[in-house]
Image: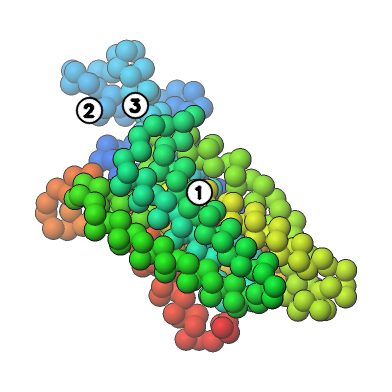
Amino acid sequence: MRPLSPRSVIPWLGACLVLLLALLVISPGIGSQLTAVGWRQAWKVRLGLPLDIASLRGDPLADADGDGDVSPLELSQYRAIIRSIGFDQRFARSLLALVVGVTLALCGGTFQVLFRNALATPYTLGIAGGASLGAVIAIRVGFTQTWMGVSPVMACAFAGGLGVVAAVLVMARGPRPLTSNELLLSGVTLGMFCAAMMMAVQTISNERQTFRMIQWMLGSLNTITNAKAITLLPFVLPCWVVLILSGRALNQYRLGDELAASRGVPVVRVQVICVLVATLGTAAVAANCGPIGFVGLVVPHVVTLMVGPDCRVMLPAAAILGGAFTIACDWASQLAMPAAGALMGRELGAALLPIGTVTAMIGVPVFLVMLRTGRFRI
């Protein structure tokens, strides 16, 4: 493992952090709504700064009665609208994208090191399949009772994701412990089983239920205020802290079990703790937002090219870049349909392109280019 070089690492981390902050700053001005709300206006309203009344004359949002003058009542209503669109909808959605991106990138980078496999993702152990199966069962049965703000679909998805990983870990504790590759194979196999069961559930569902199932499995960052992001934090914050603090141990683990153990690293404990916290974080994300692919696969590889394989730097950088990447993909998912409608000369309504489609459209070419140029080895 090459020694850390602050002179080469800090600029990359600083650039990623500046990019992320810039995306968050302008996020109140970007969204699928046709209403023109600029990010400068949104922040002025948020910070309580005065607005230029002259520039608001003729704006249908500010001049509701169209008399060419903005009254104090109209200005107050305008501020409320700007606050709702800019922060309760757009900024809250970007915060949720940030939480999701940070979690998936951290978990993906950790699994790639733990399993010593460049194709490992946060969903490698079957979390996505288990969560999707739990969600489609909840939709098919018709559970509607919400408990403490948690919908039955979210609860069943969370339980399904954890259940599949629990089955994999039970297999790993048999008479002969499973190797990393065997753990991967068991997770893939259980994921395929869950996919088959989902197809079986869909065949006995009506059209409306099937549409809801497909919509959920495509992934979504739809949110109302900051509720979803706040709901996720108790599950993902421990994941972030534990995985980032495990960077030194993961560096030694990368060199091999025997060498890591000879250097005082509790190999089994590191494996179990990292798998458990990464599973908890990924299951929480999948339960709330559905499976969103390629963030946890591509971002760690890109970051490794930027800052090197040292997990003490790679994991925090992957978290920052993963959040920025997911925010940008969410913007693309919101703006793609209005742009397509403008090109075709037709109104597409409030339809949004699933974010999982956007991450795949961007992630697949990047991954293939890296594979073709030999930037990493599988």
Where residue 139 appears, as percent x and y from the top left, is: 33, 45
Q: Position of residue 206 (x, y in %)?
A: 20, 49
Q: Secondary structure at mark 1?
A: helix
Q: Tell me if label 3 and label 1 are in contact, CB under 8 Å.
A: no
Which residue in the structure is indicated by mark 3? 81
Residue 83 position, x and y percent, is: 40, 28
- Identify which residue, 108 or 140, lies in the foreground: 140
Label 2: which secondary element: loop
Give the residue number, with chain letter if any, for mark 1. Answer: 159
Which image quarter holds the N terminus? bottom right
User: Of discs 2 and 3, which sits in the foreground?
Assistant: 3
Q: Which mark is residue 60?
A: 2
Going by the numbered disc 3, the residue's amino acid type is Ile
Q: Amino acid at mark 2?
A: Pro
Q: Nearer the viewer, mark 3 or mark 1?
A: 1
Tell which of 37 and 347 is nearer to you: 347
Q: Is residue 127 above or below residue 60?
A: below
Q: Look at 21% across and 57% down and name the residue there.
A: 340
